């Protein structure tokens, strides 16, 4: 009232009568009525658009922040289905000699526009760290996931977006490896950040003693985070922790669908990793497999198609038989090969019967894609010689056993020019298959061990021996 009276005494002209309302009464309604008269006086409509109250605030999609440091070909694929392939083994009385297989998923993804692939390609999946792992790191570093950090404009590493504000949760979840074994350099840095003499001495000795480092750190896959929890005296700032952690890398999966059969879709066969940690602390879970296991239809995953070098693709001539050897999820690319051969058969092309040597634990537990494989065998696309490691009294426990049992047929195929494809574990299975082929050359080709080894080397150099292996590091 005082302001209104003062303006009037100076000669000011009132546009409309001063509004008044009782704060204990119908305040909002009276205010809205007065504002309606106000806008009409100014020549505006009294019916204001409710949307006009929006403020100039832009929602930032954290997915775009991460995309800044990834190749342009990395795109979002949509989940069509995510199904379990492994059956419960508890009711199998003949299951002996090995543990049951963890969850293995059949995941079908829809490709975005402009993305395609060839049969035998890989899908590189860009994962994120689990929330519980990120929270664990935050607790030890005495920060919260919602706190903000600013990356440097000039000295920012390539795996982080330049000059960007991130939450700590984003930084740890989307950009850093949190479960990689600590290096000796990491141990020295941790020692330098401890005020405790005993801790400094212990970490320094681990870094300087090669045997102790490999036994206690590398072989047990103890990460920087594991060590921070084991040595509470270490006072490590977030920025130093981020410098010690490697960039979060993509995980490669063999595509288990044929590009000819399904050009707009990609199928993955993913064996999940979940087991007691070798360090003895908690459970180790695979970064990407944990993400992929829990995807629902409609969810999206960031990935790109990559062609292996050298390529791991079926021979161009479908009339040329192939020898396919794969244990566990190593079956994935061969499912794609056979799906493609079956389509070519349906199109009237001459298709040879390929030889598949798959390995699993038990036919009623983890024989992957069993119905499809049996159907393709009935159609003459493939002849299957399985190995079962947990089926009592079965003669072939491993793929190399089944391969050796068919050595005469395998040798005839090799002599006629058939290529060999091996996919799966590179630490044990792949060397065993190579050794088996050398023994086949000795037994069926009348070669000495040295001659048979040179024969296999020639097979590799001539592009007739193909490997897509993992787990060698």
Image: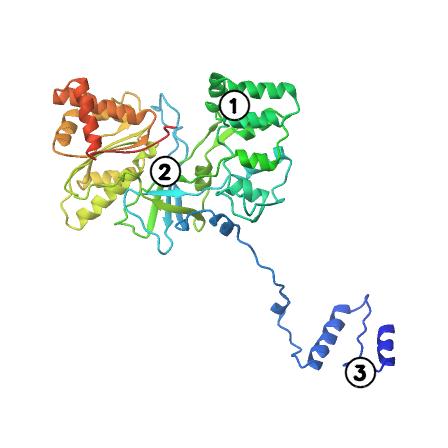
- Callout 3–callout 2 Cβ contact below 8 Å: no
**Residue wearing tag 2:** 85
Q: Identify the image quadrant of the N terminus.
A: bottom right
Q: Secondary structure at mark 3?
A: loop
Could you tell me if residue 381 is visible in this image? yes
Q: Is residue 101 above or below residue 74?
A: above
- Name which of mark 2 and mark 1 comes first in the sequence: 2
Judge the density around disc 3: few (<14), some (14-19), many (≥20) Cα neighbours within 10 Å.
few
Looking at the image, residue 470 lies above or below residue 316: above
User: Can you give x and y, in whole percent of width and height, for residue 264 in the image?
Assistant: 32, 52
Q: Residue at x 50, y 23 (%)?
A: 217
Q: Quadrant of the C terminus?
A: top left
Evaluate if marks 1 and 3 touch, with contact meaning CB atoms under 8 Å apart: no
Please state the horizontal and vertical placement of residue 383, each as a whole percent of the image.
19, 35
- Residue drawn at (51%, 50%) of the image: 65
Q: Residue at x 55, y 28 (%)?
A: 226
What is the spatial separation of the Cα atoms under label 2 and label 1, in whole angstroms? 29 Å
Q: Nearer the viewer, mark 3 or mark 2?
A: 3
Q: Nearer the viewer, residue 207 or 6?
A: 207
Q: Is 292 left, or right, of 52 in this rendering?
A: left
Residue 286 or residue 82, whichever sits in front: 286
Quarter occupied by residue 408 = top left
Crowding at dot 1, Cα within 10 Å, few <14 / some 14-19 / many 20+, comes out as few
Give how far across and how far down residue 449 sits, in percent. 19, 18
- Give the Cα distance between marks 3 and 2: 81 Å
Mark 1 lies on residue: 280
Which residue was labeled with disc 3? 13
Badge 1 or badge 3: first in the primary sequence: 3
Q: Secondary structure at mark 2?
A: loop
Of the numbered discs 3 and 2, the one sitting upstream in the chain is 3
Question: Looking at the picture, does residue 12 appear above or below residue 205?
Answer: below
Residue at 85% in and 73% down: 3
């Amino acid at each position: 009232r005082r302001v209104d009276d003062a303006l009037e005494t100076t000669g000011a002209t009132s546009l409309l009568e001063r509004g008044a309302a009782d704060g204990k009464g119908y305040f909002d309604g009276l205010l809205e009525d007065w504002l309606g008269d106000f806008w009409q006086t100014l020549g505006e409509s009294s019916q204001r658009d409710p949307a006009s109250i929006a403020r100039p605030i832009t929602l930032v999609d954290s997915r775009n922040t991460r995309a800044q440091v990834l190749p342009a070909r990395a795109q979002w694929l949509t989940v069509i289905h995510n199904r379990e392939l492994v059956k419960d083994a508890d009711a199998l009385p003949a299951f002996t000699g090995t543990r049951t297989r963890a969850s293995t998923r059949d995941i079908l993804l829809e490709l975005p526009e402009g993305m395609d692939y060839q049969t035998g390609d890989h899908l590189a999946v860009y994962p994120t760290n689990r929330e519980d792992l990120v929270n664990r790191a935050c607790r030890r570093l005495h920060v919260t996931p919602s706190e903000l950090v600013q990356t440097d404009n000039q000295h920012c590493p390539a795996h982080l977006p330049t000059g960007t504000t991130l939450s700590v949760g984003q930084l740890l979840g989307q950009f850093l490896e949190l479960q990689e074994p600590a290096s000796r350099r990491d141990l020295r840095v941790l020692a330098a950040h401890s005020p405790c003499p005993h801790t400094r001495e212990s970490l320094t000795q681990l870094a300087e003693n090669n045997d102790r480092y490999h036994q206690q750190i590398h072989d047990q896959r103890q990460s920087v985070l594991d060590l921070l929890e084991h040595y509470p005296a270490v006072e490590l700032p977030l920025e130093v922790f981020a410098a010690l952690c490697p960039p979060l890398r993509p995980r490669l999966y063999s595509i288990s669908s044929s590009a000819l059969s399904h050009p707009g879709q990609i199928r993955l066969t993913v064996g999940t990793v979940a087991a007691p940690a070798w360090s003895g602390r908690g459970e180790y879970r695979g970064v990407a497999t944990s993400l992929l296991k829990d995807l629902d239809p409609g969810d999206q995953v960031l990935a790109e198609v990559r062609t292996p070098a050298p390529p791991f693709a079926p021979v161009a001539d479908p009339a040329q038989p192939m020898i396919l050897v794969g244990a566990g999820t190593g079956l994935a690319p061969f499912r794609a090969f056979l799906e493609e051969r079956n389509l070519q058969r349906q199109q009237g092309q001459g298709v040879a019967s390929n030889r598949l040597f798959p390995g699993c634990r038990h036919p009623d537990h983890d024989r992957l894609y069993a119905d499809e494989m049996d159907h393709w065998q009935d159609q003459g696309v493939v002849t299957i010689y399985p190995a079962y490691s947990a089926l009592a009294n079965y003669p072939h426990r491993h793929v190399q056993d089944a391969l050796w049992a068919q050595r005469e047929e395998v040798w005839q195929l090799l002599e006629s020019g058939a290529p060999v494809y091996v996919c799966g574990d590179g630490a044990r299975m792949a060397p065993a298959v190579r050794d088996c082929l050398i023994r086949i050359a000795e037994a069926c080709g009348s070669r000495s061990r040295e001659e048979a080894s040179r024969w296999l080397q020639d097979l590799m150099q001539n592009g007739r021996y193909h490997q897509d292996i993992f787990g060698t590091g």
